[in-house]
Image (cartoon, rainbow, N blue to C red):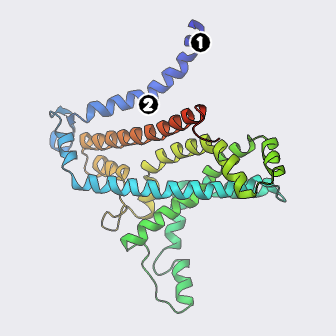
Amino acid sequence: MAISLVLLLPSLALVAAVFLWPLLRYGWLSLQASSVLTGLVALPNGGANWQRLLADARFWQDAAQTLRFAGLSLALELLLGLALALLLHRPLPRRGLVRALVLLPWALPTTVMALGWRWILNTPFGPLNGLLQSIGLPAFGFLSEPATTWLFTVLADVWKTTPFVALLLLAGLQAIPRELEEALRLEGARPWQRLRRLTLPLLTPYLMLAALFRLAQALGVFDLIQVLSGGGPAGSTESLALYAYLNAMRFLDFGYAATVMLSMFSLLLALSALVLLAQAWRQRRLEAGELRA
């Protein structure tokens, strides 16, 4: 035991340096007034930042927008990632090349990808508007309408990160013993029945893992929205991470920015705990024989 702890010390020190210390620093800063009004000197303010947060309509609007963005993008990515993983799991000609090409969107830097989408949606010179005009339709401001801007931020995120989900689920598919699938096939089970009775139950831990990864990334979305829409129009696509950034770097209100970041971290912890509890509940049901694997 003592040797194990000694061997773990470098890893624990690294985690404390890159995670625990910044988190404690944010917690301390959220209880301070640190802005241009205080000369950027941290002064205790008796929890005024948290009182301001509770009454901040812009914060609650951004929280709702971030949750909506995370929920829709996560659902689409899990669905499309599962379909893509099932396709890549099949014996395809040049399967290695196909898998490499599928991963290209995920390999692209998010900033580069967002710039590409911004060019595609440009009014009136983007390819999408060029296509509309070529068939006699007027140019449309895709990034000037709140509904379409929000929709395309979701689509851009789904386009980039679905390959990552597919990669995780493909690893899960390859871990399923072929003998089980062959046994079901010999019993006359159709493809849909094999998917429902075998593949999905055994793939559930990988789905949960993908959901946790993507949930953390979607709730902290910043660079995609900053480059693609800047949070506009009229703040309709602004995320919590972007709101914290604006408070820190534009308004130089570091105390309130830390408060927003801590609230976002608390939200992520709560949602992640729900996912883990759901998985633990399902596992207990399986062990008790109340659910069919």
Quarter of the figure that contains the C terminus: top right
Callout 1 environment at 10 Å: few (<14), some (14 to 19), or many (20+)?
Answer: few
Residue 141 percent coordinates (x, y): 42, 78
Q: Is residue 35 left or right of residue 215?
A: left
Taking the image as shown, residue 41 lies to the left or right of residue 101, namely left
Look at the numbered disc 2 and give the secondary structure of its residue.
helix
Report the residue marked by disc 2.
Answer: 19
Q: Which residue is mark 1?
A: 4
**Spot occupied by residue 91 in the image (x, y as percentages of width and height):** 82, 55
Q: Is residue 79 visible?
A: yes
Q: Residue at x 54, y 78 (%)?
A: 128
- Where disc 1 sits, the SS reads helix
Farthest bottom residue in view: 136
Q: Would residue 70 be found to the left or right of residue 87 on screen?
A: left
Above or below residue 97? Residue 43 is above
Report which quarter residue 39 is drawn in. top left
Q: Residue drawn 46% across and 85% down?
A: 139
- Residue at x 51% of width, y 81% of height: 129
> How many numbered marks have been drawn onto this rendered protein structure?
2
Nearer-N-terminus badge (1/2): 1
Amino acid type for the residue under numbered disc 2: Phe
Above or below, comparing residue 83 to residue 177 in the picture: below
The amino acid type found where label 1 is placed reads Ser
Q: Nearer the viewer, residue 159 or 92?
A: 92
For the residue pair 29 and 259, the one nearer the viewer reads as 259
Q: Residue furthest top?
A: 2
Q: Residue at x 75, y 44 (%)?
A: 174
Q: Nearer the viewer, mark 1 or mark 2?
A: 1
